[in-house]
């Protein structure tokens, strides 16, 4: 839950609790005015000469409480409380009680009992506010604990992904390094026949290029996620950018006898973007189709209603793997056991598209004739 959602959640709960407190308070006030006070008046047979002008139930209870407390104090203090404090809260309160017990030997006990009764009534009147405060405290506490648990789980997930990322980096760097070290040592010690030396050198060069590709992609991935990095966004033509990237890889598609089907509008499709980074995304998707598409198959490149589609008719992607395909170093079994990609390309592409305010999705139920499609919603 983000900060905005949490704020509205707490405000809604607060308003609900305030409404509940108001309704409960009105019900208690109604109970006092219609039932308890008339019943108490009948039992004591008192005549209420004047009540507070505001008619507030809390003020009335406090005035009644002060009235009975004052009668237990010396005469001077009693007058000061009855006509001083009560007048400060409203009009003066004067009560005449006709009960025989009130003036007899049990009068003091009756006064103390009445004080206890009005203390109970005052406490019961405050009950909705206390219950509301405790209710809101519980809501906030539960929500904070949920957020802490989510943060803890997020941190654990981050730690697992980071450890996996470091493990994959070590694996992908160690493999070509092992080959380079072994081949270069064999060449240095003269253990390789002259006719095979060029093959060894070519292998060392190929593995060096793969290491350079991995380090470059890793640098790009870290740079995109670093604090302070901003895109250089300017209005540019998406259609032209697509055609340029297709042209760069056109010969490679021909070498694999793959048919390129272009559905790109002739008129400009202007979009505010970082042309270099968005070009990297498109190039990555085309390279992905070239690498994992079917030799002699078809590749569709389409731009329609600000949606870029790159689809091919290669092998289906495993549904379980598809859920993690945009995570760093995510690769299927085939890619890991062959000279496939590094597993960083799609993660970088997804991050760039998100920074543009769009999204990159994999559609495993692509249109007829294709097994999968990557779509950029700009």
Image (tube, grey):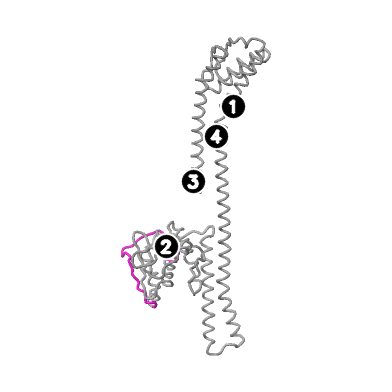
Magenta region includes residue 272: yes
Quadrant where the C terminus sits is bottom left
Using the image, determine if residue 164 lies above or below residue 179. Answer: above
N-term-proximal mark, 2 vs 3: 3
Labels 1 & 4 near each other (Cβ < 8 A): no
Secondary structure, mark 1, is: helix
- Mark 2 vs mark 3, CA separation in Å: 29 Å
Q: Which label sits on residue 5?
A: 3
Mark 2 — residue? Answer: 362
- Mark 2 vs mark 4, CA separation in Å: 49 Å
Mark 4 — residue? Answer: 132
Q: Residue at x 58, y 67 (%)?
A: 167
- Mark 2 vs mark 1, CA separation in Å: 63 Å
- Image coordinates of residue 50 in percent, x first then y, are 53, 14
In the image, farthest residue toward the bottom: 194
- Mark 3 vs mark 4, CA separation in Å: 22 Å
- Along the viewing direction, whichever of 231 and 207 lies nearer the viewer: 207
- Image coordinates of residue 39 in percent, x first then y, are 54, 17
């Amino acid at each position: 839950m983000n900060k905005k959602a949490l704020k509205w959640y707490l405000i809604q709960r607060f308003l609900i609790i305030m409404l509940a407190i108001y309704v409960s308070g009105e019900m208690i006030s109604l109970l006092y005015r219609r039932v308890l006070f008339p019943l108490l008046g009948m039992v004591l047979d008192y005549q209420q000469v004047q009540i507070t002008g505001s008619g507030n139930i809390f003020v009335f209870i406090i005035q009644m409480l002060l009235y009975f407390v004052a009668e237990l104090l010396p005469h001077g203090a009693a007058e000061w409380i009855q006509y001083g404090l009560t007048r400060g809260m409203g009009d003066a309160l004067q009560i005449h009680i006709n009960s025989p017990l009130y003036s007899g030997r049990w009068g003091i006990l009756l006064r103390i009992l009445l004080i206890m009764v009005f203390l109970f009534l005052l406490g019961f009147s405050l009950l909705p506010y206390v219950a509301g405060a405790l209710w809101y405290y519980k809501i906030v506490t539960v929500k904070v604990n949920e957020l802490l648990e989510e943060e803890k789980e997020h941190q654990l997930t981050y730690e697992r992904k980071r450890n996996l990322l470091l493990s994959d980096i070590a694996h992908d760097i160690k493999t070509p390094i092992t080959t380079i070290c072994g081949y270069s040592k064999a060449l240095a010690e003269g253990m390789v026949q002259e006719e095979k030396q060029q093959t060894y050198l070519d292998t060392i060069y190929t593995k060096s290029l793969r290491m350079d590709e991995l380090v470059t992609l890793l640098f790009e991935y870290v740079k995109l996620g670093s604090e302070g990095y901003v895109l250089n966004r300017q209005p540019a033509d998406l259609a032209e950018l697509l055609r340029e990237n297709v042209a760069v890889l056109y010969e490679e598609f021909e070498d694999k006898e793959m048919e390129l089907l272009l559905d790109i509008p002739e008129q400009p499709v202007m979009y505010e973007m970082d042309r270099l980074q968005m070009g990297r995304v498109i190039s990555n998707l085309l390279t992905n189709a070239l690498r994992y598409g079917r030799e002699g198959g078809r590749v569709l490149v389409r731009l329609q209603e600000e949606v870029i589609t790159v689809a091919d008719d290669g092998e289906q992607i495993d549904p379980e793997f598809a859920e993690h395909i945009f995570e760093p170093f995510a690769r299927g079994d085939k890619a890991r056991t062959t000279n496939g990609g590094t597993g960083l390309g799609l993660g970088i592409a997804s991050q760039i598209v998100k920074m543009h305010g769009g999204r990159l999705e994999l559609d495993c139920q692509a249109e007829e004739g294709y097994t999968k499609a990557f779509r950029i919603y700009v």
